[in-house]
Amino acid sequence: MAYPLEGKKVWVAGHRGMVGGAVARRLESENCEILLAGREVVDLSDQSAVREWMAANRPDCIVVAAAKVGGIHANNSAPVDFLQSNLIIQNNILAAAHENDVQRLLFLGSSCIYPKFADQPIREDSLLTGPLEPTNEWYAIAKIAGIKLCQAYRKQYGRDWISAMPTNLYGPGDNYDLETSHVLPALLRKFHEAKKSGSSQVTLWGSGSPLREFLHCDDLADALVFVLKKYSEYEHINVGSGSEVTIRELAETIAEVVGYEAELVFDSSKPDGTPRKLMDSSRLSQLGWANARPIRIGIKDTYRVFLETFERST
């Protein structure tokens, strides 16, 4: 199967987020018409507004990158928001896409859809084989529903819609709010602020022992465009870098990039989350994509953008 993007109208839903922004940048080299619509143009939680916008703009292809996202603290503190908001957004987009005969759709999930103690590396068929990680199960359940809804449209209506499951992401446009961010941007900000203030310590949640895989958002975008053009299967597909680090190792790498040594203090009263989470992205690599950059290079690029944007605005 091949789906050429040249000449197509491609809507990136959620283009102001880190992932959506990266996808929009990557599509600029595909000779397609990129459709972008911020909240002031169409409120994705408003079913009528989504239907009207879709009918007026008639995209050929949609990348569903719009979602309410956050780290462990945010997910744990606002379960209704994470479950309900994401269900509403994705249901509205998929329903309107069907009504308007959208040819191709790519739904983005998250690696948190998998069971907490799934066999490692995590294969696509691990979905729904065990209990989820409690600290982010609300977001995970919404994303699982999105995967299944794409499969349902494919099964009932023959829609050529697919789902991709990215691993932990970072890069330009990330969220650096310490209350709602994921671990990598949170640590980047913490080390930067420790450097500015001369603080001798940086506090991390948990034990520092969990293993995590990280992928730069621009590498994800490249993989997603590849998948859009090459993949058409009922099952979702994993998108990862194939390498992992402990949270302690991640902190040490960030300290090196920021250029500041500080004592690492581990707050054991805070949860570790899933002990290990490495995606099996062999299906993607067999298709021909394996272009993830080393994490130190990715963090260095991310810190440069952080200094140019976030730090300048505070």
Image (spheres, helix red, strand yellow):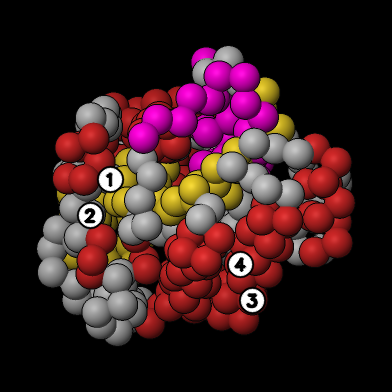
Residue 241 x, y percent position in the rendering: 24, 41
Q: Work out which residue is located at the far front of the displayed protein and give it.
A: 157
Nearer to me, 212 or 93: 93
Q: Quadrant of residue 182?
A: bottom left
SS at badge 1 = loop
Residue 82 visible (yes or no): yes
Q: Amino acid at mark 4?
A: Asn
SS at badge 3 = helix
Name above or below for residue 304 compared with residue 18: above
Residue highlighted by disc 3: 84
Q: Amino acid at mark 1?
A: Gly
Residue 204 x, y percent position in the rendering: 33, 62
- CB contact under 8 Å: marks 3 and 4: yes
Residue highlighted by disc 1: 240
Residue highlighted by disc 4: 86
Q: Counting other residues with Cα less than 10 Å from the Cα at mark 4, is it few (<14), some (14-19), or many (20 or more)?
A: many
Nearer to me, 151 or 269: 151
Quadrant, the N terminus: top left
Residue highlighted by disc 2: 279
Is residue 166 rendered magenta in the image? no
| Left or right for 57, reference 93 | right
- CB contact under 8 Å: marks 2 and 3: no
Distance between the Cα atoms at labels 3 and 4?
6 Å
First to last magenta residue range = 1-29
Q: Earlier in the sequence, mark 1 or mark 3?
A: 3
Distance between the Cα atoms at labels 2 and 1?
6 Å
Q: Amino acid at mark 3?
A: Gln
